[in-house]
Image (cartoon, rainbow, N blue to C red):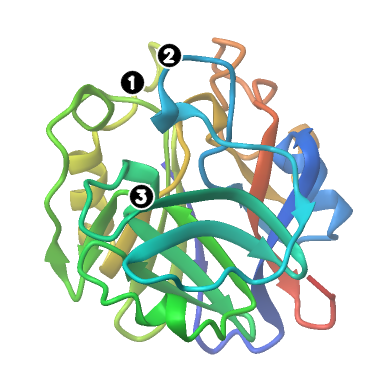
Amino acid sequence: LSIIQISKKATKTKLALGYSDSLENTSVIAKRYNALAAINGSFFKMKGPDPDHQPTGKARSSVVPKHNGNRSIVYLRVADSLISENTFARDSLRRRHQQGIIAIAEGKLSILNTISSNLYWERNISFENIIATGPVMLMEGKEQPIPNDAFCKDRHPRTAVGKMADGTVLLVTVDGRTPESVGMSIVELMRVMRWLGCSEAINLDGGGSTTMFVAGQPENGVVNHPSDNKRFDASGERPVANVLLLLPKKNKP
């Protein structure tokens, strides 16, 4: 278990999203943005049959999408780029990576639940960066319903973001898929986030993507044990499309 704690009083830093036009390691993207720290971001598109495990890598120029009746758009917007656009009916069953939103405005992070949302965030987009992910684990201090499927029940490497009532943000990674660390189920992760003091928490892309970077640390800045090489070391990063960054406030996201 690796944790980065960001105090609300940390006035010299800010949170932002970083992205790649293709797929790159979390540490590579973080260094390009001169980040103090970073974790991998949301689900992206990979080859395979399961859309819940297929996040999309290529950014493209786009205007802000319009709200259209009861249709909803889930997307990652970084400045003028759009990554991973999906549409779905407002009342339909949303996939795990469409059930929550991490939104950043003026370097501050919010966690939103699209299942219970009235789509206010879509009609009134004022956030600088938005990333769709899920499932949401905690809202207002309460455990949220977790899908009863293998992705949630089985133990895997996990990446999560939590927020305490006082505004403190936690970036969390859980190693897995090795004898040294088997990982966590989503329910186990939810309870750990609550034990850590979070009132809100959301799951991000996990598995081989799970990576935490801290500038200046050995092993290329990777402080956890990414599992894509099937070894318990810091060399198993999987290329990803987007990351959550902790930047010096003077840096442009």
What's the amino acid at mark 1?
A: Val
Q: Badges 3 and 1: C-beta atoms under 8 Å apart? A: no
Callout 1 secondary element: loop
Amino acid type shown at disc 3:
Gly
Horizontal side of 20 relative to 231 (left or right) equals right
Residue 64: name its quadrant.
Answer: bottom right
Q: Residue furthest front?
A: 69
Residue occupied by mark 1? 182
Q: Which residue is mark 2?
A: 178
Tell me if residue 137 comes above or below residue 170 in the rendering. above
- Going by the numbered disc 2, the residue's amino acid type is Thr
Q: Residues within 10 Å of mark 1 (few under 14, many from 20)?
A: some
Q: Residue at x 26, y 73 (%)?
A: 117
Q: Which mark is residue 134?
A: 3
Give the vertical position of 231 relative to 125 (above or below): above
Chain-order first, disc 3 or disc 1: 3
Work out whether residue 221 can be spotted: no
Q: Residue at x 54, y 73 (%)?
A: 66
